[in-house]
Every structure is written in structure tokens, then in C-alpha cells.
Amino acid sequence: MPEMVLARRAEQQPPPDGVELGRVTTAADAADYWQVATNAYASIGFPPEIFAFYERHDGLVAGNAATFLARLDGRPAAIAMAIVSRGVAGIYWVGTNGDARGRGLGWTVTAAAVNAGFDLGAAIASLQASPMGEGLYRRMGFETIFGYRLFTRPAAEGSR
């Protein structure tokens, strides 16, 4: 899993047709955000219950965070967030619903999060890329600075 960085603002492209990009500001927005996360991350093996603990949404609207939700034809479709700490904009939970992929929403939400991170005082943006996102981030100008190895082990007997 590559650790990637971008030391400049991201190029923003016009949103695809039918896409409305906005900041998460309400509890309803936050619920939509976590629903997209649940849908998007299922395709890389995240169990849906992993997002169930996000009942409180104040972290999505904290002063050092910028959280984005893109709606496609009025339906929640893509997400990304930036959390700024010590001059670094960490880019987290970038995802797009399966039926909305391939339309440029990933670029739209990632660029919004990166640039909001710089607006909040970051000097660099950093993320860990999934296999699905790595190519997009490279096209945006992110560079790999480190590669993480992920180790797994089978679940213990009776733990499922």
C-alpha cells in the first residue's frame, strides 16, 4: 500500500455532468457520507459494520477538517476528507459508489479535500492509496514516498 504525497494544490477540473459537490455540514450529510463509505469500501473487502460506529459526526466538521460529499443526480455518490495536523493534510476515506465509478468523481472529491487542506494551513497532502485509487493519485501528481506491507492472518476458530 503506497504512502503518497502532493506538495502543491491539486488541479481542479469541472465536476462531471449531474454532480453537485458540497461540504458535509449536517447530520443528514454525515449519514450520507458514511453510507457512501460503506458502499465504496465493500469492494475492497471492508465489512459494512466497520462504519457502524460513526454515530457521532462532529469529527467531520471539526475546525481542522474538511469533508466533502458529491451527489450524482441528487444521490450521494463520492466522498473524501482532509484532516490537517502539524502542517500535513491527511486525505482520508476517499470513495465512490460502484455504480458511479469512472466518471471523474474521485478526482473531484480528492482535489477538493487536498485544496481545502492547503487552505487550512497544510504544506503537504498525504494519503495511503488503495489499489483502486493509486493510478488516480499518480495522475493528480502524488508521488510515492513509502510502501506499506499489509499482513493478515486467518480468523481464529469460532470468531466469525
Image (cartoon, rainbow, N blue to C red):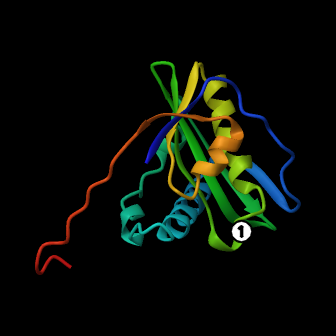
The residue positioned 63% from the left and 48% from the top of the image is 24
Q: On the image, numbered disc 1 is attached to which residue?
A: 100
Question: Where residue 94 sits in the image (x, y, percent)?
Answer: 57, 51
Residue 29 occupies quadrant: bottom right
The one nearer the camera, 10 or 117, is 10
| Residue at screen point 38% across, 70% down | 47
Residue at 77% across, 56% down: 104
* In this picture, residue 113 sits left or right of residue 146: right
Image position, residue 13 (x, y; %): 83, 43
Q: Residue at x 41, y 56 (%)?
A: 54
How many numbered circles does the render carry? Answer: 1
Which of the image's four quarters has the C terminus?
A: bottom left
| Residue 79 visible in image | yes
Task: Report whether residue 23 is seen.
Answer: no
25 left or right of 90? right
Q: In the rendered view, would you say 63 is above or below 158?
A: above
